Amino acid sequence: MEQEKLRILIADDEDIVREGLKHVIDWNRLGFFLCAEAADGDEALEKIRLCQPHVVLLDVRMPSMDGTRVISEARKQGYAGEFIFLSGYSDFSYAQTALQYGASFYLTKPINEEELEKAVLSVREKILQSLEKEKSFSHFVEKARLAILRDLLLGNPVAESVDFMQLGLSACVYQVVLYCSYTPFFAPYRFGDLLRIANRNHLAFEQLSLDTQDVILLKGSYALDKFQSCLSHYKNGTQKGSPLDSVFITYGRPVFSLQDIPLSLQDCRQLMERRFYCAPNQHVLSYETLPAGPSSHFLADSQSSAYYSRLLIDAIQTKKRSLLSATLHNLEKSLQQTDADAETVKHFLIDIFLQVKQAVTNRYPHLSIPFDPNASVIGLLEKKNYLYEIIRYFKDQTDMILRAVGQTTNDLVFGDIVDYIDHNYASNLKLDDLATLFGYNTSYLGKLFTKKMGKNFNAYLDEVRIQNAAQLLRSSDLKIYEIALRTGYSNVNYFYQKFHHLMGVSPSAYKKKQ
């Protein structure tokens, strides 16, 4: 193929000579292709700069700039290719100058075909040997660079003589990303395509494999900004078929020295171990979501399993669906703060479920509840990849138990919903979430709520929140913005508007009045 051949440039001020040189020997057979031609010295120098030919056939006497000056200027500009000088003058001084600047041959016109072919084959051999050495050296440098990069990531000592700038590893900021397929057996988008970065010569990021994990090292503020821009683009979720839909990513803290890169990698690996705690369709985990410290860790031990199994059993026996849903929700949130590994958490949850199953079987021996055998339960839950899948199994099973022990009436269920709102108004409550918790269709629950309460869900929620805010204004010294946050309003201005609308005065005026 043409791109595999060596490039040759022919420079002569006579058209007939250039045409003759193009056909005097079979360039293709010798492994060359004509990349350009030039009719004077200026044009020859420009074509050398643009085309970087491997070989230049150069006439000594040309307009604007003679051949010796062309080779002199080309060498000054860093051109390292081969020159074969051609001249109609058998002048030794020209040959001497040409050889001084590194010309390989000096041939006199008229050109002898065999002499030219011999010269071309000679420089071709020289070029191929040089390219092979260059390739071997580049391969050696690349292997050394990857080895040094691996040592940097793992925190191994690196020789002080290493020139990180020369290796392309020097930057003002770094960030490590672990990158894998979201679904097994499906190839993810390439990282460069995800960021829309060509990454020529590893300018933006490095990519290598460590312990079967694909590790990305972002280098410089531009690469980090492009990464954050990509994540922001998908902050509201991924669409099927989108680039991020095929990958799962964890990323560590930004660091500002090569020595701190292992800290960012450590964040990534801790996050990858916490993939079990991801929400449905979650594709990214950030270092910012790591548990703050030991004080916030939840212990998945026998004492905790007994506590939660007792709560679930009480909720089942009292037929309080809202308490059951809230308990499972709290259990899931608590487990997201544990430093236990996924297998430990699975066995912890298996223990809870088997305790609940045993208690229900003992409490309602006359009921034929279609529980799975214990071995099947254990096998099923051990195979789950995510915590939310196990919690969903708990919800399905406890719903089955409630149906078996006797459903409460719709009025009592609706009372549970209102009670749940009254006790959880400070949370980010949404009608969709309540419908899921209590087993209703969202649209139906919205209509039922309006019918039962005489107002829609949002209006009732605002009333509950404002009533509790008024109570805090009367009985505490909390600042108004603190009361807003405690009653579910993250936007203080919106809190002011709602309070004034329902109470007729602003929060500050209400407080003064009290």
Image: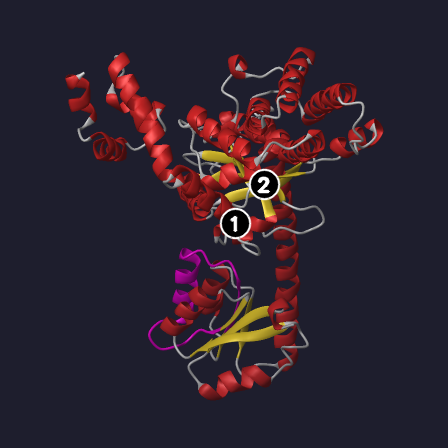
Q: Position of residue 128 (x, y in %)?
A: 65, 60
Label 1: which secondary element: loop
Label 1 environment density (alpha carbons within 10 Å; few <14, some 14–19, many ≥20) = some
Query: Is residue 235 visible to the viewer in this orientation of the structure?
Result: no
Q: Was residue 72 drawn as part of the magenta stretch in this picture?
A: yes
Q: Residue at x 83, y 30 (%)?
A: 373
Label 2 environment density (alpha carbons within 10 Å; few <14, some 14–19, many ≥20) = few
Name above or below for residue 6 compared with residue 418.
below
Q: Position of residue 482 (x, y in %)?
A: 30, 21
Name above or below for residue 287 compared with residue 95.
above
Q: Position of residue 67 (x, y in %)?
A: 42, 70
Q: Is residue 227 left or right of residue 31?
A: left
Total marks placed = 2
**Closest to the observer, 482 or 457:** 457
> What type is the residue that disc 2 sits on?
Pro
**Closest to the observer, 179 or 103:** 179
Label 2: which secondary element: loop
Q: Was residue 178 drawn as part of the magenta stretch in this picture?
A: no
Q: Residue at x 76, y 23 (%)?
A: 364
Please state the extent of the stretch shown in magenta in the rendering: 58-86
In the rendered image, the residue lying farthest to the bottom is 16
